Amino acid sequence: MWKLRYLHTRGRNLRLLAALEMQPPSPRRRCRINVAMPLLALYFDGHSDMRVDFRLTRESFNALMAVLGTDCDHGWGPEISCLVFIFWLASATSYRVVARAFDMPRATIHRLVHRMGGQIAALLYTAVRHPTGEELLRLGARFARLAGSAAFSRVVGAIDGCHIRVKPPAEDAACYFNRKLFHSIQLQAICDDKCKFIDVCVGYPGSVHDARVLKNSPIFYEQSYPPPGYCILGDGGYPCLSQPICLMTPFRQPVRNHLQARYNCCLSKARCVVERSFGILKTRWRSIF
């Protein structure tokens, strides 16, 4: 008797599964945007300030969406995917908290973050580029005003390194342990006087010295930046160079005379802009650090 009941139940379940497979999937049933969530309501009202939660103005977000495009191969749409990624990047919180904030499954948040991260990373060299032609002349004039001396009118950038905290690999974990006592990779960046990055090199382990990262970066062995006749500024961790690129660094302490002291002061005024660039980056996109 129990065998007949089992076969009957099993046959009914198979018929139900077959009926479900014949029905086309309904995107409305599987992915529905809950516009009542505060973060989504903030975006969809069309006028509220997004900087508090997303660290971007509405104009900047619309410009980003114009670059990314509207093509989408899943049901959430490009705007929702980008909002999820930006909120995760700006808030430095877990996937679980982001899932609750958007009323989405945690696995979906994980998938959207990694997908959008890859799409935005592909736009790196459309946003980060070297100035050319007249831009170099204007950039040199602005650095001269920043330093307070016309002698710095051929300066077209400031270089420095920054540590990005990572989970070390199982092998060679000691190579990623930096002098600040945590595991990281190196981010070498050159910025202009307005804290805009114009060159980046990322990926070297945290234990590597800044000078070694420079000598293994494309701007050094390809001599891609700065162009001949111009120079960039660095701190005492870099060597003072004239070839293959021109890099100006401060005199070592103690200085010998007031001219060296004045030079160090002017150089510091112009070079510290790269420190502000890293500060802006860390404050706005907290998940990176």
Image (cartoon, helix red, strand yellow):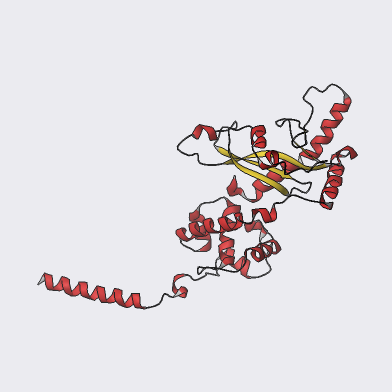
Residue 2, position as x, y percentages in the image: 12, 70
Query: Relative to 196, is 269 above or below?
Result: above
**For residue 61, what is the image quadrant?**
bottom right
What number of labels is visible?
Answer: 0
Residue 209, position as x, y percentages in the image: 63, 32
* Depth check, front residue: 5 or 74: 74
* Depth check, front residue: 149 or 199: 199
* Depth check, front residue: 27 or 71: 71
The answer to whether residue 18 is seen in the rendering is yes
Query: Relative to 176, is 67 above or below?
Result: below
Q: Residue sitting at 61 percent across and 48 percent down?
A: 286
Q: Residue sitting at 69 percent across and 42 percent down?
A: 222
Residue 158, position as x, y percentages in the image: 75, 41
Residue 260, position as x, y percentages in the image: 85, 27
Quarter of the image that includes the C terminus: top right
Q: Residue sitting at 65 percent across and 57 percent down?
A: 52
**For residue 216, what is the image quadrant?**
top right
Query: Relative to 97, is 202 above or below?
Result: above
Q: Residue at the far right: name it.
A: 150
Q: On the picture, is 98 further left or further right than 22?
A: right
Quarter of the image that includes the N terminus: bottom left
Q: Residue sitting at 65 percent across and 53 percent down?
A: 124
Q: On the picture, is 141 further left or further right than 119?
A: right
The answer to whether residue 49 is seen in the rendering is no
